[in-house]
Image: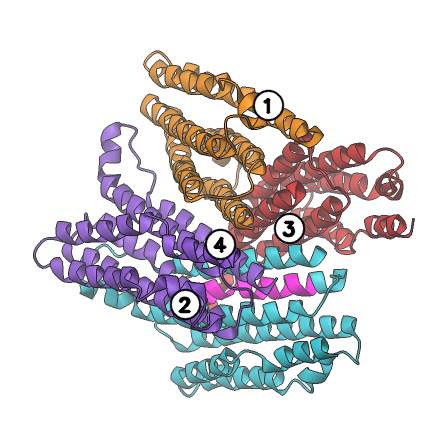
Chain colours: A purple, B orange, C red, D cyan
Amino acid sequence: MKKGRLEAFSDGVFAIIITIMVLEIKVPHGNRLDDLFPLLPIFLSYILSFIYLGIYWNNHHHLLHTIKEVSGDILWANLHLLFWLSLVPFVTGWMGENHFEKIPVALYGVILVLCAIAYTILQGRITKSLGPKSTLVKSLGKDWKGKGSILIYLIGIFSVNINARISLSLYLLVAIIWLVPDKRIEKSLKMEESE
Amino acid sequence: MKKGRLEAFSDGVFAIIITIMVLEIKVPHGNRLDDLFPLLPIFLSYILSFIYLGIYWNNHHHLLHTIKEVSGDILWANLHLLFWLSLVPFVTGWMGENHFEKIPVALYGVILVLCAIAYTILQGRITKSLGPKSTLVKSLGKDWKGKGSILIYLIGIFSVNINARISLSLYLLVAIIWLVPDKRIEKSLKMEESE
Amino acid sequence: MKKGRLEAFSDGVFAIIITIMVLEIKVPHGNRLDDLFPLLPIFLSYILSFIYLGIYWNNHHHLLHTIKEVSGDILWANLHLLFWLSLVPFVTGWMGENHFEKIPVALYGVILVLCAIAYTILQGRITKSLGPKSTLVKSLGKDWKGKGSILIYLIGIFSVNINARISLSLYLLVAIIWLVPDKRIEKSLKMEESE
Amino acid sequence: MKKGRLEAFSDGVFAIIITIMVLEIKVPHGNRLDDLFPLLPIFLSYILSFIYLGIYWNNHHHLLHTIKEVSGDILWANLHLLFWLSLVPFVTGWMGENHFEKIPVALYGVILVLCAIAYTILQGRITKSLGPKSTLVKSLGKDWKGKGSILIYLIGIFSVNINARISLSLYLLVAIIWLVPDKRIEKSLKMEESE
C-alpha cells in the first residue's frame, strides 16, 4: 500500500510535468500558418522532452514494480529524481525559445545528466534494498546502459562548442537507446515468477 | 497492477489537459458583462474540446477495461495518444482567439485526426494482444465508427475553404456520434461475462 | 474498478481546479506588506472558492461511495459537474480582480447555481440507478438542502442590485450549511451496513 | 477505501503544488549563462520549498498510514492543511523575486508556521480518533519536534529585523530536522504489528 502512494504521487508529478511543457507553446496572435513557424523549435523541443519523460515514466514503472516496501531512502531518492525532472520544462522552453543555441542546448544536457544520475541513485537504493542476490541486480549487471547514457550526455554537452546539432543528435541517440523497454528488468521479473 | 498505473497516469494527463484549457479563458480587466463577450469564442471552443476530451477519456476507459497486462507496445501507443491530446489546449486556444477563422479551424481538425489515428493505433495494439477471437475484436467489427470519424474530420478540414462553420459542424457531428457510449465494447464486456 | 477510475479522474480534476486558483494570486513586484494589500480581495475570493470546492469534493466522495457500477449516464453527469466546477477559477479571479463588484459577484453566483444543478442531476442519476427503495433515496428525502441552496444562490444573484455584500453573505451561508457533512448520506450508509 | 480517496486527492494537490512552483522560474529571453543568474534566488527558494513539500508529503503519508476510517473532522483538517500548503508557491515566488528581502522572508515563515499549525491540528484529529492508548499517541509523546519547529519558525520570522539570512538558516534548520523521517511513527507502526 505504501508503494501505491509513492507511485500515485510520482505519476501525478510525471503527468503534470509533461502537460506543463505544453504551456510553453504560447498561442500566437496571428491566424495564418506562418504565425506558427516561430513555434517550430519549441514544438520540436517539446517532442524530445515528451519522449524523455515517457521513457523515465516507463522505466520508473518497471523499477518500482520490483519492490514491495518503500523505505525513507527510496522515498527521498525518488523525490530527488522528480526534482531534476521538474526542471525539464524550464530547459525545454529555454532551448526552444532560443532556437537550439549553444548554451541552452548544453544546459538541457546538464539537466538530462542530473536526471540520469538521480535515476541511478534511485536504482542503487532499490537494488540495495533487494539484496545482492536479487534477479534485478543480476539482470542489471554492470549497468552499461545507464553509465553509457551519462557518458553520451557529457560528450553531447561539450559538443555544443563544435555544433549544437551534434549535441541534439547525441541526446536523441540516448532516447532511442532507451525507447526499447528495459528488457533486463522484464527478464528479471519473469525469472522471479518462474522461480 | 501494471494496468492500474497506466490508467492512473493517463487519468492524470486527461485531468490536467482538460483543466489547462480553462487557463486560456483569461480574466478580463473590465467588470461589465460586455467585457465577457470577447471571450465567447474561446468559451465555445473550450466546450467543444471539453466534450472531445470527455469522449476520449470515456472510450479510453472502456478500451483499457478489456486488457489485463500492459506490454511496452501498448504503453507507447498510449503515450502517443496522450501526446496528440496534449496539443488540444493549444489548438483550442488558437481557434478561440481567432474567432473560428479558416486556418485555426483547419489545424484544430488536423489535431483531431491525429488523435483519432493515435486512438486507432492504441486500439489495434490492444486487439492484437487480445487475439483475433476476442469479443472486443468481434464487437468492433470493421470499426466503421472510427474510420468514419477520420473521414468526416478530413472533409471538415478541407471545408474551411468553403466555410469554417461547415468544418465546425462536422467536428460537432463526430462528437455527437461518439457521445453515445461505445455499445460495442460494453456488449463485448457483457458477452465475456456471460461466457 | 470502473468506479475507482471515475473517482481518480474526478479527484485529479478537483485537485487541479483548487490549485489553479492560486495562480490567480500573482506575485507582486514590490517587497513591502503594502504591495500585498491589492491582493486581499483575490485572496478572500480564493478562500471562498477553496471552501466550495472542498465541499463539492467531500459530497462527491459521499455520493459515489454508495454506488458500485458506473453507467454511461453517471459518467457524463459527472463530467457535466466537472465542467461547471472548472469555471470556478475563472469567476473567482474575475470577482477578486474587480473587488467584489456587482456583475462579477452575480456571475460567480450563476456558476454556483450551475454547479448545484449539475450536482443535483448527478445525484438524480445515481439515486435512479440505486432504485426508489435504496437507503440513499430515503435519507435524501425531498432534498430540501439541495433545493434550498439553489434558491439562496438565486436570491444572492438578484441581490447584487441592492448590495453585492448581501450576495456574498448568502453564498457564504450556503457554504456554511454544507460545511456540515451530509449526515443523510452517512446515516444511509450506516443503515445499509446494519441491514 | 474512503482513506484511499483522501490520499489520492492529497497526492494530486501535493504533486500540483510542487510542479506549479516551477512555473515561477520563467524562461529568460537571452541565451547566455548570464541571463540565468537573475533566476538564482528563485531557484534557491524553489529548492527550499520543494524540500518542505517533500517533507510534508512524506509525513502526511506516515500519518494517514495509521488510520483506517476518515471522519468529516479529518477530511476538513486535511483540506485546511492543503489550503496553507497551496500558498507556498506564492510566497516562494515572492521571496525569490525579491532576492530574500525582509518582508517576503518573514511572510514565507508565516506560511510555514500556518502549515505547521494545520499539520498539528490534523495530527490531533487523527490521534483523537485513534484513542489515547494508541501507539501513535504514545510514540508522539509531547510532540517536542512539532512544537519546536513552530518555535524556530517564530524566531526566524522576527529575525528578519536583524538579518534575513538568519531567518533562512532557521527555516533550513527545521527542514533538516524533519528530513530525518519521523521514527516515532515508524516505531509506532512496528509496535502495532508486533502486538
| Residue located beneath label 2 in the image | A122
Q: Residue reaching furthest left?
A: A162
Q: Calculate the distance from the C-alpha at mark 1 to the C-alpha at mark 2.
A: 44 Å
Q: Is residue B166 left or right of residue C86?
A: left
User: Residue type at mark 3?
Assistant: Leu
Q: Nearer the viewer, residue C44 or A36?
A: A36
Mark 4 packing: few (<14 Cα in 10 Å), some, or many (20+)? many
Quadrant that contains the N terminus of chain A: bottom right
Mark 3, residues whose alpha carbon is within 10 Å: few (<14), some, or many (≥20)? some
Which amino acid, by three-letter code, is at mark 1?
Arg
Work out which residue is located at the far top of the displayed protein and give it. B162
* In the displayed structure image, the side of residue B171 where residue C2 appears, left or right: right
C-alpha span from label 3 to label 4 = 23 Å
**Residue for badge 1:** B184
**Chain ID for label 3?**
C
Q: Say which element carries label 3.
A: helix
Residue at x 46% of width, y 61% of height: D18
- Secondary structure under the numbered disc 1 in the rendered image: helix
| Number of dots carrying numbers | 4
Q: Amino acid at mark 2?
A: Leu
Q: Nearer the viewer, residue A195 or D102?
A: A195
Q: The disc numbered 2 marks a residue on which chain?
A: A
For badge 4, the amino acid type reads Asp
Magenta stretch mostly in which secondary structure?
helix
Q: Nearer the viewer, residue B25 or C132?
A: C132
Label 4 near label 3: C-beta < 8 Å? no
Numbered disc 1: what chain? B
Q: Which residue is mark 4?
A: A11
- The residue segment tinted magenta is D76-91
Q: Are marks 3 and 2 in contact (CB under 8 Å)?
A: no
Asked if the residues shown at circle 2 and circle 4 are in contact, with their CB atoms under 8 angstroms apart, the answer is no
Which residue position is annotated with label 3?
A: C53
